[in-house]
């Protein structure tokens, strides 16, 4: 049941309360309270083992949280914001989180952050753990395009904003990823590249999808569609970039340029080119995405699409606070810019 009891006719699930658990389990609310809060009352018989298990099962199904999320506590603000990121070892996500943390502090809040490792079960555990700490609201930077665990927050009326990735129908703060992909493509087209490839990132991440689609659109519109075999899924890290580059270099026809949807993956591509004796820029062009600080300091500085990572994090907090005040919020898309450096150049002579 994915932790949510659906109402007849597909209506929005009711918020999980003690009264709701009592209604569905068939026990008095005082009995439900004693079971879920682990308390005993002198002179009052405790619920049977079977009854207690039934109550706990219903509580799990409707998403009721004992202790921290009890209705009395929920009305008292903790000034805590819960944050879930895929992995803070990622420089991009760490920079976004720095923006979140600073903006939260400036607004009188503290943040609690957890890593989901882009795993659905771990993601749900993170959400549950943060809710058990009675956070006032949440920011999620790891949501898959199908929404993942968002129904848990919807069912419990917890305000939340997505950051870095978007899901249709929910408020989000991101870079304009599609435009960023288009900027990368236009840059390579202007340099004369026609045989290009894409390390497309994770197929369930909206930022990877949008960056890839924007890039492919430009080449398609220019009359040079990118073959499917040159659009390679990859992780966002260095290892994913290296693996993807190895695959492309083993192909019968090697591209003249590679666009990666993240800078760490671009670093993996550059390492692979070095090992194969191929000069980045003059031998094969490489474009990354995000403009992490390391990009400009490499021996061969990386051409990349710059996104305002810290600002994205800061704005997500502002959007969340507006939502908590009952205001209507809209998606925010920050414009990217192309930063041309040494890893891109004109197509090498045959």
Image (spheres, grey):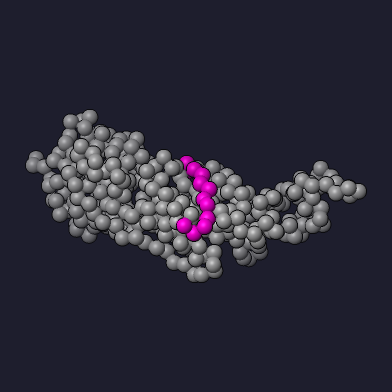
Residue under the point 69% across and 59% down = 71
Image quarter for residue 272? top left
Q: Is residue 108 left or right of residue 184?
A: right
Residue under the point 81% across and 53% down = 31
Residue 188 locus on image (x, y percent): 19, 51
What is the residue that sits farthest to the right in this orientation?
43
Q: Is residue 110 magenta?
A: yes
Residue 38 locus on image (x, y percent): 77, 46
- Taking depth in this image into account, of 139 and 29 the one nearest to the observer is 139
Residue 215 locus on image (x, y percent): 27, 54
* Image quarter (top left, top right, bottom left or bottom right) of the C terminus: top left
Residue 120 appears in the rendering? no
- Taking depth in this image into account, of 138 and 286 the one nearest to the observer is 138
Magenta span: 106-118
Residue under the point 70% across and 50% down = 66
Residue 124 locus on image (x, y percent): 56, 47
- Taking depth in this image into account, of 168 and 288 the one nearest to the observer is 288
**Number of numbered markers:** 0
Q: Is residue 37 magenta?
A: no
Q: Is residue 66 left or right of residue 264?
A: right
What is the residue that sits farthest to the bottom in this orientation?
327
Residue 44 appears in the rendering? yes
Residue under the point 66% across and 51% down = 68
- Taking depth in this image into account, of 227 and 260 the one nearest to the observer is 260
């Amino acid at each position: 049941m994915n932790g949510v009891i659906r109402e007849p006719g597909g209506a929005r699930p009711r918020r999980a309360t003690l009264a709701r658990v009592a209604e569905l389990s068939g026990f008095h609310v005082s009995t439900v309270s004693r079971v879920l809060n682990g308390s005993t009352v002198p002179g009052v018989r405790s619920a049977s083992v079977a009854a207690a298990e039934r109550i706990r099962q219903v509580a799990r199904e409707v998403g009721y949280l004992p202790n921290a999320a009890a209705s009395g506590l929920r009305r008292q603000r903790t000034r805590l914001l819960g944050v879930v990121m895929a992995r803070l070892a990622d420089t991009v996500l760490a920079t976004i989180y720095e923006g979140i943390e600073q903006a939260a502090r400036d607004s009188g809040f503290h943040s609690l952050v957890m890593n989901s490792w882009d795993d659905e079960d771990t993601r749900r555990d993170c959400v549950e753990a943060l809710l058990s700490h009675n956070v006032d609201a949440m920011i999620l930077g790891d949501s898959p395009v199908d929404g993942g665990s968002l129904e848990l927050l919807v069912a419990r009326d917890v305000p939340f904003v997505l950051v870095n990735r978007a899901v249709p129908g929910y408020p989000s703060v991101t870079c304009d990823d599609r435009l960023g992909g288009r900027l990368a493509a236009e840059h390579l087209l202007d340099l004369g590249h026609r045989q290009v490839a894409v390390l497309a990132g994770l197929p369930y991440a909206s930022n990877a999808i949008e960056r890839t689609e924007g890039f492919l659109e430009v080449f398609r519109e220019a009359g040079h569609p990118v073959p499917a075999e040159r659009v390679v899924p990859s992780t966002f890290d260095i290892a994913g970039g290296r693996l993807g580059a190895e695959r492309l270099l083993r192909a019968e026809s090697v591209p003249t340029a590679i666009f990666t949807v993240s800078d760490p993956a671009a670093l993996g591509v550059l390492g692979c080119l070095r090992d194969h004796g191929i000069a980045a820029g003059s031998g094969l062009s490489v474009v990354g995405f995000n403009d992490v600080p390391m990009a400009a300091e490499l021996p061969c500085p990386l051409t990349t699409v710059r996104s305002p990572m810290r600002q994205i994090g800061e704005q997500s907090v502002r959007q969340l606070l507006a939502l908590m005040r009952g205001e209507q919020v809209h998606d925010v898309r920050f414009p990217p810019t192309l930063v041309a450096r040494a890893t891109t150049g004109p197509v090498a002579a045959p």
